[in-house]
Image (cartoon, rainbow, N blue to C red):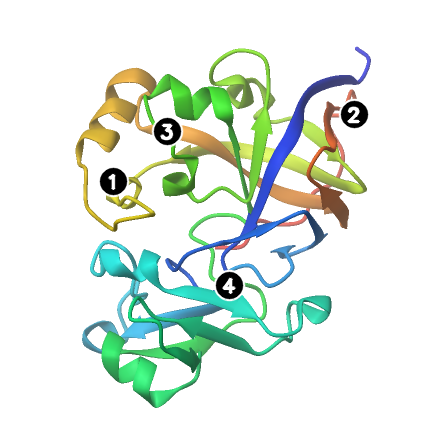
Amino acid sequence: MSSAVVGRVVALHRYPVKSMAGEALERADVSWHGIGGDRRWGFVRDDARGSGFPWLTLRQRPDLVLHRPRLLDPRDADRSPVVVRTPSGDEHDVLSPVLAEALGARPVKLDRGVFDAAPLSLLSTGSAAGVGAPDVLRFRPNVLVEAAGGFAEDAWVGSVLTIGAAVIRVDRPDRRCAVVGVDPVTARRDPGVLRRIAREHGMTLGVYASVVSPGRVAVGDAVVLRADRSAGVAAASG
């Protein structure tokens, strides 16, 4: 089996604060813990301290997606200060007590990121179209890929991919939840999105991946399916 080009990167995103809006990138450095600056901050709910999943997310606050974080020093993404622009247009440091009070939650910094399953998520444009959702940002992918056919990334599970200078392993399908029903532009809920994923694709859409070898990726990079499926892989972050 020889290596083969199976797609091309058409968009890259990082999400500096869990469940808030993402930042579109032309290029990104991928480390063992995913894209630099991705989900390095989260907010812990005041009413859920000590629980197994204490994070404030779009499940509780759909309007989180209207909060727009940005890095002040993108050259040092994992250490950069982060500011958040609220839906009203005010801008606060992520550590601001004003922001914490408004959200009813306290900010937490995790150097390895706040991931539900793994440090990278990939989605193909065909998969989004296959469930009738052209607004791909509701699925919050790190890497959006244009590939032949619908649900192309399903065939990559268990395989090793090269994207730009990074090497990743596709570990498993991304099982979806009610978060995908939140419109990234209006924050309105549409439960029909999750029902379509359940009907058309068994509740999964896109894939999770872990990092075999760090490196820089960019929009336009080829996605290459490698022949060496047995390459060593870093453990996925929870």
Q: Residue at x 46, y 67 (%)?
A: 69
**Visible residue check, residue 119:** no
Residue corresponding to mark 3 = 204
Inspect the image, locate mark 4, and give the three-letter code of the amino acid beneath it.
Pro
Q: Nearer the viewer, mark 3 or mark 4?
A: 4
Q: Residues within 10 Å of mark 4 (few under 14, many from 20)?
A: many
Location of residue 7 by image quarter = top right
Q: Position of residue 72 (x, y in %)?
A: 61, 74
Inspect the image, locate mark 1, and give the three-letter code of the amino acid beneath it.
Gly
How far apart in space, not on screen, are marks 2 and 3 (Cα)? Answer: 26 Å
CB atoms of marks 3 and 1 within 8 Å? no
Judging depth in this view, the residue of 211 and 124 nearest the camera is: 124
Helix, strand or loop at disc 1? helix
Q: Position of residue 168 (x, y in %)?
A: 69, 39
Q: Residue at x 67, y 26 (%)?
A: 8
Q: Which mark is residue 181?
A: 1
Inspect the image, locate mark 2, and give the three-letter code of the amino acid beneath it.
Asp
User: Sequence order check: which comes first, mark 4 or mark 1?
Assistant: 4
User: Sequence order check: which comes first, mark 3 or mark 1?
Assistant: 1
CB atoms of marks 3 and 4 within 8 Å? no
Q: Quadrant of the N terminus?
A: top right
Q: Residue at x 24, y 79 (%)?
A: 102
Residue corresponding to mark 4 = 16
